[in-house]
Image: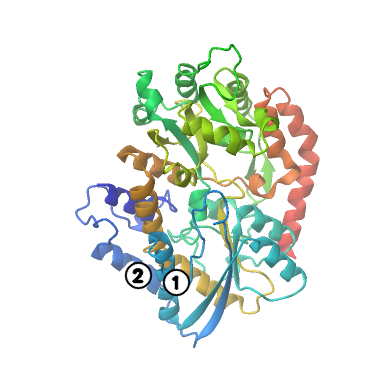
Amino acid sequence: MKSKRIYSFALAALLCAANLTACGGNAAGDDTTPAAGGTTAADTTEAAQWYASLGERNFEGATYRILARDETSNWSQSVLEMGLEVENGDVLNDAIYKRNRMVEDQYNLTLEITNDVKAHETSKNAILAGEDIADIVIVSLEACCSMNNQGMLYDLLQSPYLDFDQPYWDQNAKTDLAINGRLTFMTGDLTPMSGQGTWLMYFNKDLLEKYQLQSPYELVDNNQWTSDNMFNLAKKVASDLNGDTVIDDLDQYGLLVQNDDVQMFYQGFGERYTENNAEGIPELVVGTTNRSVDAFEKLSSFFADTDTTLCSNRFASKYTEYHTVSVQTPCFQEGRALFYPSGVLRLFQMRDYEIEFGVLPMPKYDEDQENYSHTVKVNWGSAACIPKTVSNFDDVSFVLEAMAAASLDTVTPAYYETTLGTKLMRDERSYDMLDIVMKSRSYDAIMFYNWGKLVAALNKVGAEGGEAFMSTIEAKRESIEAAITTTIEAMTE
């Protein structure tokens, strides 16, 4: 059943991919399947246990201030991270509202929520001025890195209350975002925008049927959803629609991308740009193995085949609007592309599309790749942090943990089961695919810290044929190592 799959995925798989036993989520086939939008006694008991593990506290009506990003003016108009101060009938907003009230009632405190379209700028300026304006700040992953590089954030691992082994925290983020034994921001069930920013692959089911192509779902089931098989399908639908012999953005393509998708394919192939060594220090690993080089050459060949692949950046000068809006959106909406990598939040934009589409993981490099791999776009995904202007770090970290714990049984099912599942997904198999995607997210630190601006440079290289791959890495190596040192120094101040 849909409700069981999405709900158990949200509880057990989304943010604790390799920790199912510890999380205690319901397994498929369990007899305690909740009704749509509801929970079972087992679900409630487990959620209450995690909540109660914090212990008894009475904050005697104290106020805790949360400054959160407001992205509702964005084209997606999808998620207000901390919700409104009132219930309005929207399932996700009302779940966030319920979560906030649960925390307030349980611990006799008040949550003062400020949703700010310039939350990063507001918090950064205040911290620089030594002003204590927020206890918890929730902004993009990119913004958290910027604040961390200026020594503005507490090391969350110093809290006696934050337990990042719990399933409501993203287990891969816990490992990947820790540097030199310190972790200054964290993501999980508390921040639904991290789900929004997760990259995956959309596909046009109408084109699949028209050209009588094999279902990608079958390829996933048989461990054959690989880069070569994806591109072979893509080549079969590419067409000069108007017959003018000029292949442009108005024709039909097998693969619809932008430059940034170079990094999404590269990480989808199971490769990384940086990796922590035994001491927890990030080191540059991109281009250090034959597989890494081959993987980059492979994805670059996809971009180079301009008959099959439409890269919207190539037509950026043709339109006044941003190329993803002026090129990508109409191409997929009008049914002129078979495969389209993008973020989960695109589902909100696609809800009224007339075409039939499905969801897939990013393809593996080849069948020998053991696991799928996905990442979160730097400015779409969110994380929570505690600024150093806060004087009562322990108490604030307790509140942060309580909010994360309370999200598991409220925000998570509302977002994954109801908002994505019931409202936006078009078929049952898409739920299975979303499960795979969320279980296999990783966070390569260089993407979020932008050390040496390497990732953007390699995105351009890959989109233009990939010939300068190794020379670009070597040209930036020194600046990357210096930037990593700066980050570590900022975290130890």
Q: Compared to 466, does 11 lie above or below?
A: below
Residue 306's x, y, as percent?
Answer: 60, 19
Q: Give whichever of 144, 239 is nearer the camera.
A: 239
Above/below status of 349 relative to 305: below
Q: Under tag 2, what secondary structure?
A: helix
Query: What SS does tag 1 mark?
Result: loop
Residue, disc 2 = 49
Coordinates of residue 416 in the picture (x, y in percent): 39, 52
Q: Which residue is mark 1?
A: 86
Residue 160 visible in the current orientation? no
First of labels 2, 1 by sequence position: 2
User: Residue 276 or 404: which is nearer the viewer?
Assistant: 404
Locate the C terminus by quadrant.
bottom right
Determine the residue positioned at 52% across, 39% down: 342
Which quadrant of the structure image shows residue 215? top left
Q: Quadrant of residue 298?
A: top right
For the residues bearing labels 2 and 1, Cβ distance under 8 angstroms: no
Q: CA distance from mark 2 to mark 1?
A: 27 Å
| Residue kind at label 2, given as amino acid type | Gln
Q: Is residue 359 left or right of residue 185?
A: left
